[in-house]
Image (spheres, helix red, strand yellow):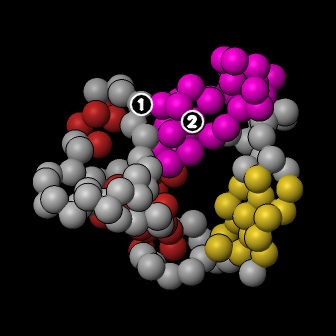
Amino acid sequence: MSTREKLAPARTLLDAGVTVAIASNLNPGTSFTSSMNFCVTTAVLQQHLSLDEAITAATTGGAKALRRHDVGGGKDPSGRPAKGTLVPGAAADLHVLNTTSAIDLAYRPGMPLTWQTWVGGDLVFSA
């Protein structure tokens, strides 16, 4: 975003059957944000994804891009706990929101929505 380049054609890619991943990047030269909420907002409002598509791109899409997605039984291809899905045996990395609707991810950019964060099944943050 900092370079003012066009955003990736996420809608076109999804329509073509491509798995899309969105991430914060946190790169001072191109995209200096660590907010996944902001990335979901951008995907919905600027790249024409539905909220469900943006959440999938932020979770399952990212896990697939990193080869950490579930291949059955909650394991990734290397046998580690899977990321990006809620299935038995997966890593249980969760970002729990303090809101009544997930749509707030897209329409309340910059608002602190985190209630809890879990990594590997362990609570690491609670508001």
Residue 31 is situated, as x and y percent measured from the top left of the image, at 31, 60
Quadrant containing the N terminus in the rendered view: bottom left
Q: Is residue 59 above or below residue 98?
A: above
Q: Position of residue 71 (x, y in %)?
A: 68, 20
Please, is residue 122 above or below residue 71 in the view? below
Q: SS of the residue at dot 1? A: loop
Instruction: Say whether marks 2 and 1 touch (CB < 8 Å).
Output: no
Which corner quadrant of the image does residue 45 belong to? bottom left
Q: In 3D space, how far apart are the residues under numbered discs 2 and 1 (Cα atoms)?
A: 11 Å
Where in the figure is residue 26, as x and y percent of width and height? 41, 58
* 62 in relation to 33, above or below: above
Residue 57 within the segment the image draws in magenta: yes
Q: Amino acid at mark 2?
A: Ala
Q: Is residue 124 left or right of residue 100?
A: right
Q: Residue at x 80, y 47 (%)?
A: 120
What residue is rendered at 51% in x and 39% in y?
Answer: 62
Q: What is the span of residues highlighted in magenta in the rendered image?
A: 56-84
Pointer 2 residue: 63
Residue 19: mark: 1
Q: Is residue 23 magenta?
A: no
Q: Residue 4 occupies which quadrant of the picture?
A: bottom left
Q: Amino acid at mark 1?
A: Thr
Query: Which class describes the residues within 10 Å of circle 1: few (<14), some (14-19), or many (20+)?
Result: some
Q: Secondary structure at mark 2?
A: helix
Instruction: Decide if residue 50 is in sight here.
Output: no
